[in-house]
RNA sequence: GGGGUUGUAUGCUAGCUUGGUAGACUGCCGGCUUCGGGAGCCGGUUACCGGAGUUCAAAUCUCCGCAACCCCA
């Protein structure tokens, strides 16, 4: 059978598969602006889910939401030197309104440190005003010149930006693990997505930060991609924006700051990692439709099958997001293929047999095996099945991640691992020189230094120069 | 950062070399028959990426722009 509107390539042809899966599933679409994509309802639902649960976790942490302007005056933007140097090439500017040129051009935020800190510097006067922990949900524009890829590299993307301000460095630092924990919980519990948590190297850290941390994912083509991140900004921005307070002794002090973000890019990583040859596989918790019921009937059985299907629908609709697809211009096979492309977690097939036997035929999207279950306590049966599906998806992704990492003991092994499209986990002396040479030599960059891989580092030698190693770092081709 | 390819309807594509009525399949809409893995028949619907140029005449040739994709660094 010719498949005209399904995916025409296998997932192993990853680049082509990825685009087709996102577009043909009707989750996302291109727009007329290069590098800017449209989130269609099923795609946007995933982001709403991430937002909802992240937002709740932030609020439980004591972080409050606020909103700052989209446009940033040039003068403000240029206050922190490293920051402006890091972002300048990608900043889009508003220069003109109607026919008149603006006296001072306005940056469309690539990130909001400068506009936020300009405001908060006026609000913070005393140690009693601290900590001030703010977050905003918004989109930012970074005019990338590399080839855009939907979700993974777009010129506008959606994110949260957390900006927190503390009286002491200890307090600021102690926030790090709690935020990274929130992010990795969201990834694991909602997106079934495992990642590698670690610190970025000096050369890969955020423009203006003292230390950066990230959660990195491994894509099916062996490249790594950075997910959520967290930055200790120290007093860099506080000094640039004059964020000062009087401490308990009456002395003027600069504050310590952190920033952190999760972006719509994680959706791209998730879809890429879980999908298969037939299309997307959406984790149940973030799928707009969790269960689709496909009735199968002929003229004779129509009434009975639809009545049974409706009964099941009504029961399940109390606890799940269910669609009963009783449109009769498509054959069941046609519907199966469409819902598989769209990654609906669970399909229920109901025909005359199921009706007579008081049973359901169910198919989990990730396993694609048909199974008949009794129509008894189906709410709890199905919620167990969806729970198991989530767990299995996470396990499978975790295995793929573990299998992709190769621990290398010398430079040849590192090069071999990278040419095999693997992640090379190597000991490194910490010098900029070695890191740069490896990068230009192999085209792979350091992604991060995984927290859980650092033990025993004192006994190891740098994979490039042979000097005493200071860190274990992952090198990978990267998005 | 460098090099290359492509753009025709929802999608896929023919036509372009040699300028002259834009065609198939799919989708979508209506109707009838169907329905356990992309059903059939009949009828209908929709397109030359944008702009400029050459020409009696441009999907086709030229230039500029926009967009998408690939390769190398």
Image (cartoon, coloured by chain):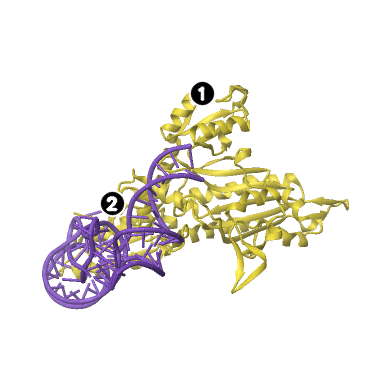
Chain colours: A yellow, B purple
Q: Position of residue A255 (x, y in %)?
A: 76, 51
| Contact, mark 2 vs mark 1 (Cβ under 8 Å) | no
At 38% across and 53% down in the image, what residue appears? A19
Left or right: A155, with A6 as reference point: right
Query: Could one spot residue A190 in this view of the protein?
Result: no
- Camera-side residue: A202 or B12? B12
At 44% across and 56% down in the image, what residue appears? A285
Residue at mark 2 shares a chain with residue at mark 1: yes
Residue A433 is marked as: none
Residue A410 is marked as: 1
Q: Position of residue A112 (x, y in %)?
A: 64, 58
Give the number of callouts: 2
Q: Is residue A337 above or below residue A204?
A: below
Q: Position of residue A441 (x, y in %)?
A: 51, 31
Distance between the alpha carbons at the discs numbered 2 and 1: 41 Å
Q: Position of residue A110 (x, y in %)?
A: 60, 57
Is the N terminus of chain A in the top left, top right, bottom left or bottom right quadrant? bottom left
Q: Is residue A17 above or below residue B8?
A: above
The local secondary structure at tag 2 comes to loop
At 53% across and 29% down in the image, what residue appears? A426
Left or right: A92, with A217 as reference point: right
The local secondary structure at tag 1 comes to loop
Residue A8 is marked as: 2
Left or right: A69, with A51 as reference point: right
Mark found first going from the N terminus, 2 or 1: 2
Local crowd size for mark 2, using a 10 Å CA cut-off: few (<14), some (14–19), many (≥20): some
């Amino acid at each position: 059978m010719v498949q005209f509107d399904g995916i025409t390539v296998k997932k192993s042809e990853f680049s082509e598969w990825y685009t087709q899966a996102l577009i043909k599933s009707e989750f996302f679409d291109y727009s007329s602006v290069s590098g800017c994509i449209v989130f269609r309802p099923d795609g946007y639902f995933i982001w709403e889910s991430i937002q909802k649960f992240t937002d709740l976790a932030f609020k439980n942490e004591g972080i409050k939401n606020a909103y700052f302007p989209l446009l940033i005056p040039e003068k403000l933007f240029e206050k922190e030197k490293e920051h402006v140097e890091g972002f300048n090439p990608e900043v889009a500017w508003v220069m003109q309104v109607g026919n008149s040129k603006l006296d001072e051009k306005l940056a469309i935020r690539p990130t909001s440190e400068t506009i936020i800190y300009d405001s908060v510097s006026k609000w913070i006067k005393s140690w009693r005003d601290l900590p001030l922990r703010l977050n905003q949900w918004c989109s930012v524009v970074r005019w990338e010149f590399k080839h855009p890829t939907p979700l993974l590299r777009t010129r506008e993307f959606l994110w949260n930006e957390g900006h927190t301000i503390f009286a002491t460095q200890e307090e600021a630092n102690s926030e790090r693990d709690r935020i990274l924990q929130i992010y990795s919980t969201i990834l694991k519990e909602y997106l079934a997505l495992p990642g590698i948590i670690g610190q970025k190297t000096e050369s890969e850290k955020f423009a203006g930060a003292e230390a950066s941390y990230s959660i990195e994912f491994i894509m099916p083509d062996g490249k790594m991609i950075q997910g959520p991140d967290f930055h200790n900004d120290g007093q860099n921005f506080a000094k640039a924006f004059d964020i000062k307070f009087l401490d308990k002794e009456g002395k003027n002090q600069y504050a310590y700051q952190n920033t952190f973000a999760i972006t719509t890019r994680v959706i791209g990583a998730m879809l890429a990692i879980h999908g298969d040859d037939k299309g997307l596989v959406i984790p149940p918790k973030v799928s707009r439709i969790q269960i689709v019921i496909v009735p199968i009937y002929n003229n004779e059985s129509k009434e009975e099958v639809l009545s049974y299907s409706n009964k099941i629908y009504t029961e399940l609709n109390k606890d799940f997001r269910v669609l009963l697809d009783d449109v009769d211009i498509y054959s069941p096979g046609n519907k199966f293929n469409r819902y598989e492309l769209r990654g609906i977690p669970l399909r229920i097939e109901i025909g005359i047999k199921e009706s007579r036997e008081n049973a359901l035929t169910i198919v989990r999207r990730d396993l694609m095996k048909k199974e008949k279950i009794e129509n008894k306590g189906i709410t709890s049966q199905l919620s167990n099945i969806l729970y198991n599906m989530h767990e299995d998806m996470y396990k499978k992704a975790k295995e793929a991640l573990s299998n992709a990492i190769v621990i290398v003991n010398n430079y040849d092994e590192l090069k071999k691992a990278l040419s095999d499209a693997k992640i090379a986990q190597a000991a490194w002396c910490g010098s900029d020189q070695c890191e740069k040479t490896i990068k230009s030599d192999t085209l792979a960059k350091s992604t991060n230094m995984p927290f859980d891989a650092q033990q025993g580092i004192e006994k190891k030698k740098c994979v490039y120069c042979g000097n005493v190693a200071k860190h274990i770092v992952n090198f990978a081709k990267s998005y």
